[in-house]
Amino acid sequence: MDHITPPTGGTALASDGVARQAPPMIVSASYKTDIPAFYGRWFRNRLDAGFADVVNPWGGTPFRVDLRREAVDGFVFWTRNAAPFLEELDRLSAMAWPFVVQVTMTGYPRALERSVIPTEAAIAQIRALSRRFGRRSVVWRYDPILITDLTETEFHRAQFAELARALSGSLDEVTLSFTNIYRKTGANLERLRREQGIAWRDPEDPEKRALLAELGLLAREAGITPTLCAQPDLLADPLVAAACIDARRLSDVAGYEIAAVTKGNRPGCLCAQSRDIGAYDSCPHGCVYCYAVGRPDTAKRKHRAHDPDGGFLMARSLA
């Protein structure tokens, strides 16, 4: 881009009981929920207001994220469906505000992903995002890799090969990871086993490494760089460690350097420092492996109660 002036940083606001970040900052929207698919109007309202209020999930403390242009270097969006958000992406692009869209697409059976868009639509959407905003503006996520009766290793080999061929030329990175069996994830998978008789398993590391290496080679054959998200013990050629919030990629999109320090949110995470404006237990997609949702019915209830005009994505009484 020509004649683009990068953010210069904002001034910390006076304290009124709500902590604020020291800008400029990359904003994540959001690894806790799917803002592009379900909360686009809220995001537009927050951008117009110049801030978003967030509740720290570990202590309940509220803080304010400054969303003024001078305070935000760029955005990283995480989604299963960017179509409802295209108007907002167009708006950001017109304002020369850099962003990267991380699109998760696995094509798992409906028993595992209850309400995501069809795989064919997701492929078409990624291709369209690439044409509209550039190849560096979109990253495909084939994660988490989940091993069940319906998705054994043979399923992943065939599925990933087909998807990689379909996306060849449209993007330059695919991020992979195996399912981390967090408390919420394990509870949902056990519920799946009890209620639908679909068994799951967490393979030993050598099996995981072997499958990741195979998928990585398939990605390379399609001209796509395979990266691995925050699982350094499973890293094997031809994969390299992922930085999902990537200041270098944002810099390429922006046309100027975006300086950021690496500050991952878990061991092995190489993400640049950022602020996330989402909320847990608010994505109604219903994916059984999701680390961010305890019970799908709770997420649906919170989604119905969402106020797009509120400062918080979810009112504090619902958080």
Image (cartoon, rainbow, N blue to C red):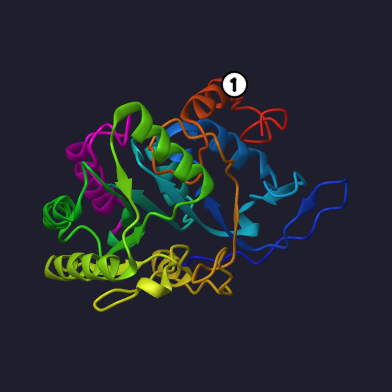
The residue that appears at 50% across and 31% down in the rendered structure is 295
The residue that appears at 29% across and 77% down in the rendered structure is 236
Q: Can residue 191 be seen in this snapshot? A: yes
The residue that appears at 42% across and 51% down in the rendered structure is 93
Q: Say which residue label 1 marks.
A: 305
Compare residues 49 and 283 and report the one nearer the observer: 283
Q: Is residue 111 magenta?
A: yes
Label 1: which secondary element = helix
Number of numbered labels in the structure image: 1
Name the image quarter holding residue 82: top left
Question: x, y percentage for residue 5?
Answer: 54, 66
Image quarter of the C terminus:
top right
Question: x, y percentage for residue 37?
Answer: 41, 35
Left or right: where 143 falls relative to 26: left
Graded by Cα atoms within 10 Å as few (under 14), some (14 to 19) or many (20 or more), the crowding at tag 1 reads few
Question: x, y percentage for residue 38?
Answer: 46, 32
Residue 225, compared with residue 87, is above or below; it is below
Which residue range is magenta in the image? 106-134
